[in-house]
Image (tube, rainbow, N blue to C red):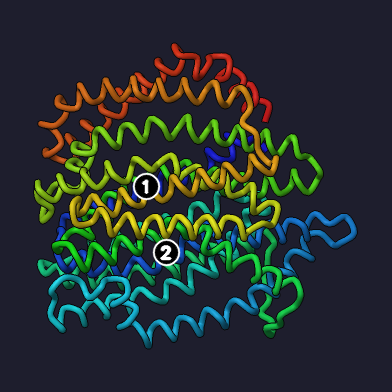
Amino acid sequence: MNLLKATGSIGGLTLLSRILGLVRDSLFARFVGAAFASDAFLVAFRLPNMFRALFAEGAFASAFIPMFNKKVADPEGKGLRDGLDFAEAALAVLLPVLLFMTVVLEVFAWPVTLLLSGRFNGVSADQFAYAVELSRWTIPYLMLISIVSLFGGILNSLGKFWVNAAAPILLNLTLIVALLCFHSDDPLVTARNQAIAVSVSGALQLLWLAWACRRNGVRLRLRRPRLSPEVKQLLKLILPAAAGAGAVQINLVISTALAASLLDHGSVTYIYMADRLNQLPLGLIGIGLGTVLLPTISRQLGGGEEAAAMETQNRGMELALLLTLPATVALVLCGEPIAAALFGYGKFDAMDTHFTAQALAAFSIGLPSYILVKVLTPGYYARQDTKTPVRYATISMVVNLVGNLALIVPLKHMGPPLATAIASTVNVWLLYHTLVKRGHFAADARLKRRTVRLALAALAMGAVLWAGQGLVMPYVHGTWTIRIAAMASLVTCGVVVYGLAAVLTGAFRVDDLKLLLRRRRSN
């Protein structure tokens, strides 16, 4: 498998989804602003967002894909049919559990909302009842997206990565249509319509994945639930993987709850908008790499190719750093013009933009860690070790909680993002150190050499952008055309400077590009 090509395919679709997500967030900022209505919707949206990350991008895929691949690749089995039998058995158990969980959450939406928000900061009973209503509208998305993850795991195992990567586009399109067609002068009405649209988008994603499965010869039958030994093994792997994969999401839930309960209204929105910008490179690089690395490494290990698996992970880390380091520097140093261009109009004023840029800088310090988690955890999951990542994720959650409590009062809306970045860095160090200690990973000479040079290239790019961002600031408050042109100029400048610096420092060689082009033509 061509790692760059496969990652690029997923990354391209994820990039499209993230761009549409930024359009959605820009419209949301325009029509709702940063106040109680926006905070209430974002708290209601946090729970389904967490489950999407846990299942669609984390625990279920991490546990299901290696087991499914093993069934399909078994030389003594029936190939795909054995894999689909296993998928049907998993669905038979998963579906009633999801239905039960959805009903329970709908009934107990009031305490769930209280847990996620800390009852906000000084709201009335009617306002809190409104927040609970929004949660009830978004809860069905949990069940829908979890079933989507099962179909997506099957298609990823069959090499159809792009289908699952395209599904989140439907979420953003649905919310954009709701904002354009059903917005109101009353932010409370607009936010309620957004909550309804979340669950509608889950149904559309499920229909898309089900159709794609049928197109690829995958037809799952409904069975009576039975806890077979294989399903028990799947559940045994999912539970710790959920905590491991969801460390960042659980940290964000903690940050959101503390911000909602301790800070002024609008703080949840600043943190959310900053996280959305931070998620752009994470989605483009981290999710794409993680999606490709897990089935690739699991196949290599299944074939006894330990050296090939280590080479794959080395190149995965190199590719992650090549793309992540410049993104980190740019988001830390140039958050003000970026936030102003995307969100700074309508009900989202200049102070809201400034606070969002501050939260973005704090989040982005941990961007390399967020992405390296996606690169390192397949080294554990491919060996069916889900306990070690969950142990380290638990440690990182404790670090995050302590950091939140220590930083939220003095740093306000910057405290929770900075605590999240520190906790993720601790998690990555533990994952890396253990893989090295076990002999499952060793950074080769090429990775060590290029890491230093990539960092130098990124710092050179940052110096140029820091000096030149004042030139684009007058244009980030203009029309959409002018805003896009200003951002395009800033991005183009960064790409050119980083590319030249990478070549001059030897972090990237022209021969590498020629080799990639030759491989692309041969494929």
Q: Looking at the image, can residue 466 be seen?
A: yes
- Depth check: give the residue in front, 491 or 454: 454
Percent of width and height locating residue 241: 57, 62
Using the image as rendered, state which of residue 238 and residue 225 is in the foreground: 238
Return the residue at label 1.
421
Q: What element carries label 1?
A: helix
Residue depicted at 59% across the width and 59% down the height: 61
Q: Residue at x 33, y 67 (%)?
A: 45
Quarter of the picture containing the C terminus is top right
Q: Which tag, 2 or 1, sits closer to the chain's start? A: 2
**Is 68 situated left or right of 428 in this image?**
right
Residue linked to disc 2: 50
Residue nearest the observer in this picture, 208 or 31: 31
255 up-or-down from 233: above or below: above
Pinpoint residue 148: horizontal percent, then vertical percent: 53, 66
Q: What residue type is labelled 1?
A: Ala
